[in-house]
Amino acid sequence: MPEVRERRTVSSWQEGTSNSNNYSLQSRYTEEHLSVGITWTLKADGLQQHKTTPGVTLVRNRKLRSSSPKLGDWINVGWPDDAILRWCASHMLRKKLPFLHSLLSPVSRHVGHLAGHQYDVIVVGGGHAGTEAAAAAARVGAETLLITQKIHTIGALSCNPSLGGVGKGQLVKEVDALDGLCGRAGDWAGIHFSILNRRKGPAVWGPRAQLDRQRYRDFIQSELLSTPRLTVLEGSVEELLVTEPNPEEPGHHRVTGIRLANGSHAISARSVVLTTGTFLSGSLFVGQTTSPGGRIGDAPSSPGLSHTLRERLGLRTGRLRTGTPPRIVKDSVDLSLAKLHLPDSHPTPFSFLNTHTHCKPEEQLPCYLTFTTPGVERVVRESLQLNCHIQQDTKGPRYCPSIESRVLRFPGRSHQVWLEPEGVTSDLLYPQGLSMTMPPDIQLRLIREIPPMRRAEIHTPGYGVQYDFVCPTQLSPALQVKSTQGLFLAGQINGTTGYEEAAAQGLWAGANAARWALSMPTVTLSRTESYIGVLIDDLVSRGVTEPYRMFTSRAEFRTSLRPDNADLRLTPKGFEEVGCVSSVRYQESLRVRNSLQDALTALQALFLSTSSWKKKLPSVPISETKSTLLTGLDLLQYNDVTFEMLASAFPESLSSYMEFAQRLKIEAVYKPHCDLNKKEIERIQREENMSLPQDIDYFSLPVSLSDEVREILDRVRPSTLGAATRLEGITPAAVVNLLNYVRVTEKKKETHRNQRHQEAQRDEELCANSASLPQ
């Protein structure tokens, strides 16, 4: 039972009945967590323990196993059943209970007192980038304010109800390794888990899950609203507060806060993270109808923010587009005409802290696969003149295109359509692959050209969105705007697409914004150590011409950057260097690392001849012609050998490591590849350690560089030599000349530092000699 020192009870009440059980809620302000919490108690004949959440207690009916607590007592419990959780996290956050509005955010109604409050970090936007940014900043230790238009849409899955995939699953695992939210939220909300790319090697496996929209949103909101040092405010940001820069730091401006859209309230902060998603000058398109907005059902963002970025800060911006399919009424679809696609029988969690998912294997829901017909192409072509979104030149996502784009680019083909569930109790299906922006009546005609949907009904029509983005080459690897001190950008504002890409950027931008605000140096991730590093390096070095999506093929060292070892790669760095990882997760990662190292040592200590191995493992095809000795690690590299087989043969040495059986198998398989990559990784890391001054004048640089190369370097201004080598248009000769210049410059600096050090030593010796002379 956690010790909680109650400061005061805000309110308590009785809230109706449900299934003959009386529910009562009581809110408390706790000194321990310094945050308002909600105590939810089921007044019935018993309790069941579940999960502990700071500031939130939830109990459900079960046969009495202990003495009945008093109303409002804090007990060590956990997640309730779905009905209670939905009521608590969704019903309350929608402010159907008036008290919660005053509890969670008096600032939502009375923001005037915030004008005199100095926050360390302000995060604008409550999507996947914004929630990760706000949580990361608070974990680092910054007093953080999250501003979102609607509290109840925090953590909403705006488009597809899924998480992960090829390349994307790696990002989710890495976000989790850095103590982010989305991995644990996926484990809680997942209703269909699968590993994509299983026919290929484990390095490119793609962990993926279909999600229950409501469960996912409930989890994210519960985590954020119980996070210490984090305040949530409903509002719309009109502009950034900008002043003169700190002359000791690079940049032409310095951000000092934001002003809300009503024009009367300015809120100060040392750093600001913009995660505006599709809302930055967003426009919605359905047929020939256009309206301002970034998501259907939500108010548009203020145009002042785009104006500030372009006119006040002089940032280069562009325009991108995306879209979403119609939502289909499930009962109107004949699923017997589609191909059944079952989930994995044993769900694989995203989070390294979880051994199983919330959804039991037998409770998972299936997906269904169907295909478009020639009738779909006919409807698309007949309605092009009624679709203004598809006629425009704005770039859309290449790897998740609308059905209109697919038909026009690949005429005469049949295209996949996945029918995916939106939740355990949802009566809707999400038709993955049918993003469209034609008029609603034409959308209905189109979907009814697909056999399982001959009689389908549309619940919500599909629509398109166009929005502004900031050219990401204007950012540093810390995701800070180079020209503006304290301003960080994350998510679709940087030209990316996808929840996972947004979450990864949000976490890194939030952590660095907090470090900047707390006068700590910002940190970077190398593309040699993480997919997040690959993502950020691609953005800041190469920029985007279309929405950026992560793939495993973008990572040169994907055999090292595997989903299974993200905790070993990033959790220690997150704790020791960044400060965004809890000590609990850090200690667990150390335990895992040490156990794996001990297991690998034990495997390498097993030296046997091929004939001896043949006797130990008679079912394994081992060639006895080999005269060399083989270790257990060598044997584990065989396709037909599992760690369980070796542990059964050598139980005294290996049986204690059975929980790491799969990880050890993967480590053994990829060890030769990782060893070969080491030299190349070390070379890239050396180049990345060679920094290029941000104020360097490339046009007057005394180096043999073409005018084209100088223009590229001046426009992008790479922060390191490694980033410069990856710029399009930079020739190998230019890299060599730049490398020589950096080496000469560094040598001169080192010589100068040594001279100053020697002069200081001589001055100290003179002072010491003078002090020893008689007066």
Image (cartoon, grey):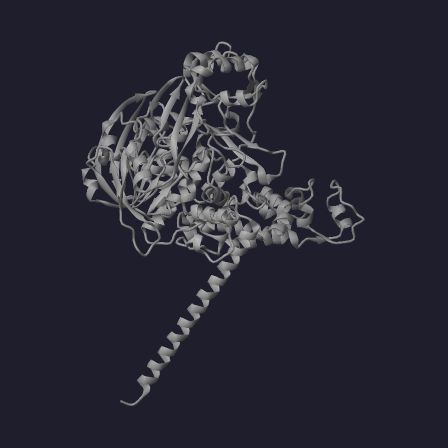
* Depth order, front residue of 249/665: 249
Q: Quadrant of the C terminus?
A: bottom left
Q: Is residue 317 above or below residue 670?
A: above
Is residue 387 toward the left or the right of residue 558 in the image? left
Total numbered badges shown on the rendered structure: 0
- Of 420 and 54, which appears nearest the observer? 420
Residue 3: percent from the left, percent from the top? Answer: 31, 45
Q: Is residue 32 above or below residue 213?
A: below
Residue 82 placement, left or right of 37: right
Confirm whether residue 424 shows in the render.
no
Q: Residue furthest top?
A: 455
- Position of residue 390 in the picture relative to residue 21 (left or right): right
The quarter of the picture where residue 28 lies is top left
Q: Position of residue 690 (x, y in %)?
A: 48, 56
Residue 189, by quadrant, is top left
Give x and y (percent) for residue 686: 52, 56
Q: Is residue 27 left or right of residue 493?
A: left
In x, y percent, where is residue 454? 51, 10
